[in-house]
Amino acid sequence: MKKILLLAFTFTSFISLFAQWNNTGMNTENTLKRCSFPSNDTGYIISDKIYRTVNGGTSFDSIFIGNAVNYYSIDFRTNLDGVIAVDVASSGNSIFRTLNGGNTWQNISVPPFQGIGINVKFADLLHGTYLTSAPIIYNTANGGITWDTMTYGYDYFNELDYPTATTGYIGGFDGTFNYYGVIAKTTNGGVTWNVVNNFTQNGSIINHMQFLNADTGFACFNPLSIPSRLLRTYNGAASWDTVYFNGFIEDFTFSDYQHGFIISDSGSIYITSNAGVSWTLDRLATDYLSDIAVTPSFAYAVGVSGTAIKRNLPAGIPVQQLETTLSIYPNPCADHLIVTLPHSTDVVSVTATDVTGKNCGDLSFTTLNANEISLDTRRLAKGFYILQINGKNESFKVKFEKGKEKSKLRKLALFNLCNLRNLWL
């Protein structure tokens, strides 16, 4: 790792006059552990059950999963596609996935999973990664039908983020009593991971991580003494610089590179508008908070005693895009291509144009999810194409290659996933 650049840190201790954190319509005294808000109005929170809102927190309903006794991690990639790590009384460590917003859940576990569930996310419909308290990385390339395992010595990973359908990062520590931080990266949707950073400071366990795109991201660790370190990278974790936070970072989230929030161990919330160089108190602690998330227009935080609060993002913050570009898979493709759109879209037609500008006509497609479609590309000749995906009120363009898929297993995985979807829906 390149030499860390230490930037000056200035800390202000006054309450922002524009802070507007308000209680949502949560009606429980239970401790809220984690939250996932894939859009402004739709969100999911775990406690001793799953709480769901579709109206921006005005009201919540409850979802239960079978004999689940503990809920550890939740992540919704879209409003409808979500995954959760739970402990089930009859079978132990398990993963469940939904493709209809939590109305029904499918157990996609292939036991035994070792350790206790910590973090699970899917990069797209097929590729997912599961981290437990054991020094093992679990990966699936077929929507959870089967899982592969990978180990890196005694490294333990607990943080996970997929900024794109192919690029992902995991963070943790080396398993020694020095607790040296470790970050690994994938560029193929979790099929393989490579360690890209080994930190050398005692107590540099990577506690939290967020990437805004494939190259730009943040991570943090809390050494044995204050201040905590917020790490920043611009080049896909090839190098990091460091800014300080004069306290213990419980969690953080950024809406863009300049603007973000930190939850301290006291439950106070701080805000930055200069990429973490300085922080301003935005909400004084009244209860312990455990998680924070941002959507294009709002920030949400949850914690003990049923605390679920919300605020508008401050004026002047660029509107966040949950995905800045379309995701396509596989690329190159043979017979079918999966396209993930930036948000829920009612697709009307899809047109292909070759590199000479010739219109190759409309492609037939199947809707897989609120923001995902599967295209039939069998009639196209090998080569490069521009897709124009037309919705009722907007359109998108993306480039892809028609050729030979890298592995026949991908076709089988897609076939199996479609069959699995039929069982869920």
Image: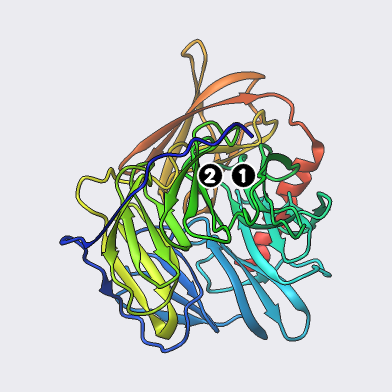
In contact (CB < 8 Å): disc 1 and disc 2: yes
Residue in view at x 61 percent, y 80 percent: 65
How many numbered marks, from 0 up?
2
Q: Nearer the viewer, residue 147 or 331?
A: 147
Is 386 left, or right, of 84 in this rendering? left
Tell me if residue 221 comes above or below residue 28 in the rendering: above
Tell me the distance, in whole angstroms, between the alpha carbons under discs 1 and 2.
6 Å
Tell me which numbered mark, 1 or 2, is placed earlier along the sequence: 2
Given residues 48 and 341, the one toward you in this image is 48
Q: Residue 376 falls in which quadrant of the image?
A: top right
Q: Residue furthest front?
A: 225
* Residue furthest bottom in the image: 29
Front residue (pair 221, 320): 221
Q: Which mark is residue 368?
A: none
Disc marking residue 163: 2
Whether residue 219 is visible, yes or no, is yes
Looking at the image, residue 28 lies above or below residue 134: below
Q: Amino acid at mark 2?
A: Pro
Q: Which residue is mark 1?
A: 168
Could you say which quadrant of the image residue 319 lies in? top left
